[in-house]
């Protein structure tokens, strides 16, 4: 089969949507190597995470001629000529978008990750909401099938865009396979020294923005023993200033460590040296850091809202995201109850296995087979 992807974010974004795009392309080319995969992207630069693009069953396409100067025009319209030339049978928009023109002989699928901009519009500029709504809704309407990455996202696509449930398929996403491996003692010591990790810490991983609700986790810290620290890994947004002001007011600077630029291959050792992972987000389309933590064999405490219980499974602890006392109580339980901790780790590993690469590849391929001859 000849399968095409809108791969812009695979080559340009090295966090969430980019990780999903790269993982999808990589595992399909691994588990279904007889197909030919075409990656359409206006941006292509060398990066260690892009090594999969050199596989013999993968071809990378970009704009040529004057279209190099106007990438959006190529992605929306010009790419149709490339799709036709490459005889693409199925085109997959990996991050909520499809070209305006694809071609009558090419079937189309689009993945929708979340509709947070509609669920929580106060976190987005009005123009951005308008653009996202217009693009995502049009893609869902043009697509032959829509992939939702969680039951929550499926419900939102139906509610906000009016898409028939019969057109939507649920295919969960996973995390990078590097989190399946236990870091060596040497790796752990080196990472600990490089980032000055404390001896005992709760870990947060994610963009530091209001929706992720890190400030409430900070407020829980004074309710815990003094030797418990918080390590927050993620890119700081404007909300980060508010979090730091909270830390100063509570006199917690010595107990909170921010890590803004962490090498991707260092993340497993950071996870595996934490005592607990905490993500008190107000809303998530899925919650990949939860899976990263489960595979890293650490207990997870996260919110009892949106898709997070789907990501965490039945063995983890769920809390009201705005209740710092409840968050602190859950953290204390994990520290104090060795039996609970063991049950959370074992149950987490079992649940995370449902999202390993082979399962995801097979589920995705099953959706493709609905449209391919």
Image (cartoon, grey):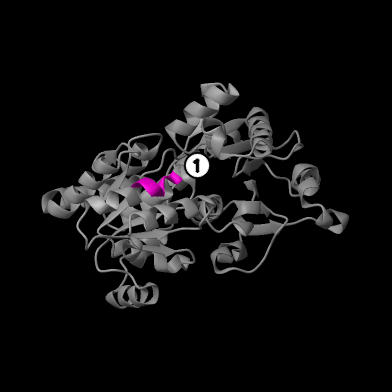
Number of other residues with Cα within 10 Å of mark 1, as a class: few under 14, some 14 to 19, many 20 or more: many
Residue 169: give x, y in percent of width and height.
Answer: 50, 32
Q: SS of the residue at dot 1?
A: helix
The quarter holding residue 256 reads bottom left
213 part of magenta stretch: yes
Residue 57 at x, y percent in the picture: 61, 58
Left or right for 207, reference 222:
right
SS assignment for the magenta stretch, majority: helix
Tell me where residue 103 sits by quadrant: top right
Answer yes or no: is residue 207 visible.
no
Q: Residue at x 31, y 73 (%)?
A: 188
> Does residue 272 appear in this view?
yes
Apparent side of residue 325 relative to residue 177 in the rendered image (left or right): left
Q: Residue at x 67, y 41 (%)?
A: 89
User: Is 186 a magenta residue?
Assistant: no
Seen from the viewer's position, the closer of residues 329 and 296 is 329
At which x and y percent is residue 287? Answer: 42, 45
Q: Could you tell whether 221 is left or right of 263 in the image?
A: left
Most distant residue in the right direction: 66
The residue labelled by disc 1 is 364
In magenta, the rendered stretch is: 212-216
Q: Quadrant of the C terminus?
A: top right
Q: Nearer the viewer, residue 219 or 48?
A: 219
Count of numbered marks:
1
């Amino acid at each position: 089969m000849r399968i095409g992807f809108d791969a812009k974010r695979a080559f340009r974004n090295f966090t969430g949507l980019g990780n999903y795009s790269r993982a999808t392309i990589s595992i399909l080319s691994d588990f279904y190597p007889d197909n030919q995969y075409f990656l359409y992207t206006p941006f292509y630069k060398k990066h260690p995470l892009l090594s999969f693009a050199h596989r013999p069953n993968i071809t990378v396409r970009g704009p040529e001629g004057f279209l190099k100067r106007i990438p959006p025009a190529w992605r929306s319209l010009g790419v149709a000529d490339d799709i036709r030339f490459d005889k693409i049978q199925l085109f997959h928009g990996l991050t909520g978008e499809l070209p305006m023109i694809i071609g009558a002989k090419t079937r189309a699928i689009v993945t929708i990750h979340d509709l947070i901009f509609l669920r929580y519009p106060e976190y987005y500029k009005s123009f951005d909401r308008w653009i996202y709504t217009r693009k995502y809704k049009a893609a869902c309407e043009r697509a032959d099938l829509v992939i939702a990455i969680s039951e929550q996202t499926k419900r939102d696509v139906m509610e906000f865009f009016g898409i028939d449930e019969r057109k939507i398929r649920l295919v969960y996403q996973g995390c990078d396979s590097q989190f399946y491996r236990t870091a060596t003692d040497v790796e752990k010591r080196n990472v600990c020294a490089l980032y000055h990790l404390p001896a005992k810490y709760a870990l947060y991983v994610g963009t530091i923005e209001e929706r992720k609700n890190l400030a409430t986790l900070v407020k829980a810290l004074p309710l815990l023993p003094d030797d418990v620290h918080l390590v927050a890994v993620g890119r700081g947004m404007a909300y980060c200033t508010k979090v730091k002001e909270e830390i100063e007011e509570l006199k917690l600077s010595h107990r909170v460590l921010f890590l803004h630029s962490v090498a991707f291959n260092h993340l497993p050792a950071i996870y595996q040296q934490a005592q607990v992972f905490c993500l008190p987000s107000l809303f998530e389309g899925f919650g990949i850091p939860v899976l990263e933590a489960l595979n890293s064999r650490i207990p997870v405490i996260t919110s009892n809202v949106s898709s997070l219980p789907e990501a965490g499974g039945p063995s983890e602890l769920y809390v009201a995201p705005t209740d710092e006392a409840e968050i602190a109580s859950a953290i204390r339980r994990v520290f104090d109850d060795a039996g609970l901790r063991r049950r959370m780790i074992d149950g987490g590993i079992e649940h995370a296995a449902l999202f390993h690469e082979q399962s995801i590849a097979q589920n995705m391929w099953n959706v493709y087979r609905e449209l391919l001859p």
